[in-house]
Amino acid sequence: MGYAKVFVGVLFLFVTLATTSAIKCTTNTTTTNSTCRSLIDYVPVNDTVLSAVKSLFQIKRFHDLLGANDFSTSTLPNQTLPAKQRIRIPFTCRCVNGTGVSDRAPVYKVKKDDGLYNIAFFTFSNLVTYQEIAKVNGIPNPDKITVGQELWIPLPCSCDEVEGAKVVHYGHVVESGSSVDQIATVYGTTPAILLNLNGMANASQLLAGQVLDVPLKACNSSVNSSSLDYPLLVANGTYVYTANDCVNCKCSSGNNYILQCEASGLKPSPKTWSTCPAAQCNGTSSLYLLGNVTTASTTCNQTTCAYSGFTNESIFTTLATESTCPAGGPTGSPTSSPGSDASKNGMQGFRWNFLFISIQLIILCFTLS
């Protein structure tokens, strides 16, 4: 029995280490635009549906969940999300005292037979610890929560620039068998940047289940500083709706990381406008509609009617000349492409990991007993 207790203790230690987040956020929260868009993985324990995920994380609009995962706009809320299949959760991040947390959301209402550990480990798939939930909610005794009590779940995040570049911070839940080099390659960054962002001395500290801060490159845009959605950071491989849902903007490495925006075709939300304002450049011709390419040349430059922001009264556009030449930037930047699409799946190869260690410990316990 003594050896079994030792094993359980070691197992608990490994689980704790594997799920501890080291995401930092030093952005000055006293300045304007102190919040930012962030993403984090959610890996459900059981089968669920997309509408339940939306509800759990209190995502205001279903198409925000679709855009964060580049799902088709025709995807239905009742689509099944199988157990253990990850999905990206979009949320608003705020920096407080050097730590980034979700901006007072999501809020979870305690149910019968709930405990803080179960809420953290099972309901929210260990994205946070029960101690973190207790701390931000001012709960002195984690064993004492009441049915109906509302708990703020502080998802880890960051708004910091990375080597001078604005990025979208993505809380990536590390898969068993992954390595720092593989993750850096897949998401278009460098091992050194990942180690630095996550306070890791070396790559051997990477653990399965860890929430790893991964900086995703955001597309360049023409949005001006007076716009209500400035800075509009859209991560590679995602899309967002902006301007009260009247505009859809997509980011893709295939477009040289230049934001592609067009009229969404949706009704305005919230109901600031009864209909979406016109979004055109230099006149009323259909050639100048938002998103249309107006001119092109043999020098691989093109002029597009680009989205440049909105106020409560109007949607703004500008004629933007963009290069469509193949990307070939330096590879040492925080989000530069390593020569292949940053969204491709290339995580292969295995190393000694938590599962293998656990098996060895079990064998050891039986040998010594």
Image: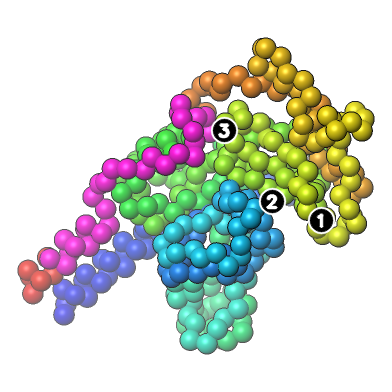
Please name whichever residue, 160 or 58, is drawn nearer the observer in this view of the structure. 58
- From what the image shows, is residue 148 above or below residue 160? below
Q: Which amino acid does label 2 sit on?
A: Thr
Q: Residues within 10 Å of mark 1 (few under 14, many from 20)?
A: some
Which residue is under mark 1? 267
In three-dimensional space, the C-alpha distance between marks 1 and 2, rounded to whole angstroms, equals 26 Å
Q: Which of marks 2 and 3 is nearer the N terminus?
A: 2
Q: Residue furthest top?
A: 298
Question: Considering the image in quadrants, where does the N terminus appear?
Answer: bottom left
Q: Which amino acid does label 1 sit on?
A: Lys
Q: In this view, does 262 lie to the left or right of 169?
A: right
Q: Is residue 257 left or right of residue 332?
A: right
Which residue is under mark 3? 253
Q: Magenta residues?
A: 335-363
Asked whether residue 95 is in view, the answer is: no
Q: Which of marks 2 and 3 is in front?
A: 3
